[in-house]
Amino acid sequence: MLNSVLVVDDESSIRSAIEQWLSLSGFDVQLFSRADECLAHLPEHLPGVILSDVRMPGMSGLELLAEVQRRDPDLPVILLTGHGDVPMAVEAMRDGAYDFLEKPFSPDALLSSLRRALDKRRLVLENRALHQLADNRAKLDATLLGVSRGLQTLRRQVLDLAALPVNVLIRGETGSGKELVARCLHDFGPRASKPFVALNCAAIPEQLFEAELFGHESGAFTGAQGKRIGKLEYADGGTLFLDEIESMPLAQQVKLLRVLQEQKLERLGSNQSIHVDLRIIAATKPDLLDEARAGRFREDLAYRLTVAELRLPPLRERREDIPLLFESFAQHAAERLGRTFPPLSGPQLSHLLSHDWPGNVRELANVAERQVLGLGLGEPEPVGIDPGQSLAAQQEAFEAHCLRSALTRHKGDVKAVLEELQLPRRTFNEKMQRHGLNREMFL
C-alpha cells in the first residue's frame, strides 16, 4: 500500500507530533533522528515519501535530498524549514525537493502536501512497473523460445507466478526444460538478487541426502570434517530447485515438510534452530499424487509443493517451435565452437519435424550441435509409427507425417500441397487442425 512516510527530525517532540497526526490519518510512519539512519533503511522503491528537517546534526536535510536524488530522482522529499531557511528551501526545490513547509505548520498543510506527493509517487511506481513488465516479457520471450500456443501460455504463467510467494511444481518429460523454467521463475521475481540453488534428488546417495540438504556440524558423523552449510540454508532468501523430487527418500520428505511448515531447520549434529526464508520449486516427471497413492511419496508434502503447477509441453506437441529452437541451438554451438553452419535444406527440416523427440529440447540441442560439427542430423523415424499401435493410430501418424513433409517441401505453399496430395481445401484444413499444424511453421 502506498502510504509510507519516513520522518527525519532531530527533535523528538516534533517527531512525536508528526507521528500522531499521520498515524491518525492512516499513514505508515517510520521515525529517524538522523539522516544517515533514514538512508540506511531506505528501500529501493519506497512506496511513499520522505519528510525531513533541513538543519540537523551530522548530515543535513539538503545533503539527504542530494543523496536521495542520486539514488532515486523521482522519490518526493518534503523539507521542514525554520523562517530563516525559506530562501534555502526555495533553492532546494529547484534542485529536486518536492515541497517545503515552514515551521510551525498546521496538520492540514502537512496532510495536503503529503497526499499530493503520494499521488505523484504512485504514478511513478505504476509507470516503472509497466516498463518492468514489458522488459520481463521481452527477456522471457528470448529465454523460453517458441511461437506455439503452449509456449505462449507457459510464458504468461511464468510471469504471473514469478511475482507470487508460492511454491511451484513443474511437470514435464525428460529434457523438456524444467530447470530453465525454474530459473525463469526465480530470475523474473522479487528473489532474483538472492541465490538460486539447484539439487537433483536422484543424483544423491540416500545416506548423504540429509547432510546435503540440511548441512552438518563438525564431527556430526564419521567423515564430517568441519561445518558445512546445506542447500536449504544456502538458498535462504532465494529459491531452492529440487529436480526429480519424486526420488527424495521418504525420511527426508518428512524433514523437508517440517522446514516448509516452520521455516526453520537444524544442521546435523546441532540443536540450534536456524530460520530460513526460501521458495521451493520442485520438478517431476510422474504425477506426485499418483506417487503418493502408491506409497512412494508423502501426500501432505505433495500438496505443500503443488500450490501452483506448471506443465511443460513435450516437443512433439509444439512442432512449430522446432525450426526456431534448432536455429538458436545451432547458433550458440557455432559461436562456442568457432564454426559456421549452413541453413537447413527442405529434407533436413522435414526430418526434424517428423521425429518423435523422446529426449525433447535436450535431444534437439544435441542434434543441432552435431549439425554444426558436420556430423549430420541422422535419420529420425517418422513420428509415432509404432507396430504395436492400432491400425487407426498408425494411419493417423502417417497422415500427419505426409502433411508435414509436403508442407516442408513446398515451404508452406498451401496451393502446391493441395495439388500434390490431391486434397480439397476444406479437407486439408480439417486435417491440419486435427494434427495441430499451421502453415506458418513451414514458411
Image (spheres, rainbow, N blue to C red):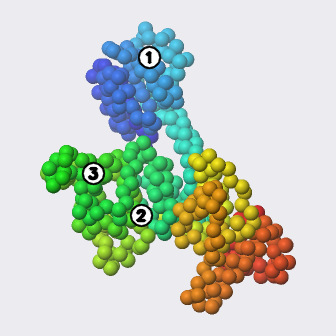
| Residue type for callout 2 | Ala
Separation of residues labelled 2 and 1 (CA atoms) = 52 Å
Nearer to the camera, 309 or 328: 328
**Which callout, 3 or 2, points at the residue further toward the start of the chain?**
3
Name the residue at 57% across, 70% down: 357
Instruction: Report the amino acid beneath label 1.
Output: Leu
Which residue was labeled with disc 3? 230
Which of the labelled discs sits on residue 283, or is there none?
2
Name the mark nearer the viewer: 3 or 2: 3
Task: Using residue 143 as the reference point, say whether residue 105 is left or right of it.
Answer: left
Placement of the N terminus among the 4 image quadrants: top left
Viewer-nearest of discs 1 and 3: 3
The furthest residue to the top: 84
Residue 190 in the image: state x and y as whole percent.
43, 46
User: Which secondary structure lies at badge 3?
Assistant: loop
Mark 2 is surrounded, within 10 Å at the Cα level, by few (under 14), some (14 to 19) or many (20 or more) other residues, namely many
Residue closer to the observer: 350 or 283: 350
| 32 left or right of 353 in image | left
Q: Which amino acid does label 3 sit on?
A: Gly
Residue that carries the numbered disc 1 in the rendered image: 62
Is 36 rendered above or below residue 177?
A: above
Instruction: Check disc 1 and report its element: helix, strand or loop.
Output: helix
Whether residue 62 can be seen here: yes
- Residue 206 at x, y percent in the picture: 26, 64
At 43% from the left edge and 8% from the top edge, which residue is drawn?
84
Considering only vertical position in the picture, is 284 above or below 158?
below
Above-or-below relation of 303 to 230 = below
